[in-house]
Amino acid sequence: MARPAGKNRDGYSWYPGSWDPTIRRSLLMMGLVVGMGTAGYTWIEGWSPWQSLFFTLVTLTTVGYGDYGLSAAGERFTAVLMIGGIAIVSYTASQILHFAISKATFPERRMIQQAKQMSGHFIVCGLGRTGQRVIRRLLEEDATMVAIDQNPKLVEDARERGIVAFEGDATSDQSLLDAGINRATSLAAVTSSDAANAMICLSARALAENLSIIARAEEEASVCKLKRAGANRVVSPASYGGDGIAASLLHPEVARLLPGLEDGHGDVEFVEYLVSSSSVACGKSIIELGKAHPKLVFVASHAKGGNTQIRPPASHVLSEGEVLVIAGTQFDLEALRRPSRAAA
């Protein structure tokens, strides 16, 4: 995945809006001092703006550059500017130096700062084999995510792929808060330990009641425990893999079509499609949408605050906030998404 414009390999943006608030305030104060000094000399001494700016910079940097023949009022103004301005310049310089050193020596702070600016993102706890497949799929969908793992090598590899990732214990409340759990959409607890996944679920549910939590279960006996710990859904790789192999044996054509049952990339994909106010589907019936996209299959519909309806009737009119479950090829699904993205 290509890095967003203006960002380096660690995901840190050089745009001022993403800088540390202390740095922004310091630079703003220094700018105000320079501006006030320039305006003050222009008004008091009658100098040109450039001459006033030059003398202001000479004063603030304590360089000294000849005698400008200041008036008494100008001397008093210079005294105030030196006392207050030099203090602000020194403070700003120290903050920038501290900021630069911390960025160079504490990469975790960079990642946590990035995570604090995210909203509606996914949190992936664990970067093992399952976690790697999760983030790969999320990257394919251009999803925003934060990854947490205790293995520094796996964390560094994730950063190389443009992912906001930091080293930490995902069972810790602080790590989850650093990942922005209060603003996240969903969390995946996919470490190799069922006990750790259960602790992650407990901590995450306590911090965010409405968060969608998906957990991995290594042992079949852990499925119920993880659900009691707060997981909305539990996936067992062993069970899922066994079912996939059985399906490939019994129904090879079905396995070839469906994603994940054969090589992870079937011909047919199942996706959720949220009907927003700007969506091309909003206000249209199923039959109208079907005529525009004849190769898509509308599997189910879940109205906001309502029940899930399997195979919604052709006359059903889609409303804002409704979620459609659609089956189709990636090309046909992208054709449906494209108009709504353009409108947004």
Image (spheres, helix red, strand yellow):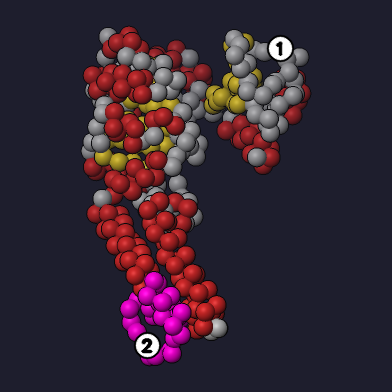
Q: Is residue 288 above or below residue 117?
A: above
Q: Nearer the viewer, residue 125 or 97?
A: 97
- Residue 89 located within the stretch drawn in magenta: no
Camera-side mark, 2 or 1 = 2
Q: Is residue 240 left or right of residue 279?
A: left
Residue at the spot 30% in from the left edge and 46% down from the top edge: 109
What residue would you read off at disc 1? Answer: 313
Residue 288 falls in which quadrant of the image?
A: top right
What is the CA distance from the residue labelled 2 to the residue labelled 1? 83 Å
Where residue 157 sits: x, y (%)?
A: 31, 45
Callout 1: few (<14), some (14-19), or many (20+) C-alpha neighbours within 10 Å? some
Q: Residues within 10 Å of mark 2 (few under 14, many from 20)?
A: few
The reply to whether residue 92 is visible in this rendering is yes
Q: Quadrant of residue 228?
A: top left
Three-letter residue code for mark 2: Tyr
Q: Which mark is residue 65?
A: 2
Which residue sits at x=59%, y=9%? 307
**Which one is nearer the viewer's eye here, 87 or 70?**
70
Residue 96, quarter of the rendered image? bottom left
- Residue 262, numbered label: none
Q: Position of residue 60 (x, y in %)?
A: 37, 74
Q: Majority secondary structure of the magenta segment?
A: helix
Q: Let me know if residue 75 is in the magenta part.
A: yes
Look at the picture and state if 63 lies above or below 115: below
Q: Position of residue 300 (x, y in %)?
A: 61, 15
Q: Which residues are magenta?
A: 54-81
User: Most extreme residue toward the front, as rendered?
Assistant: 72
User: Earlier along the polypeptide chain: callout 2 or callout 1?
Assistant: 2
- Element on which disc 1 rests: loop
Look at label 1 and name its amino acid. Answer: Pro
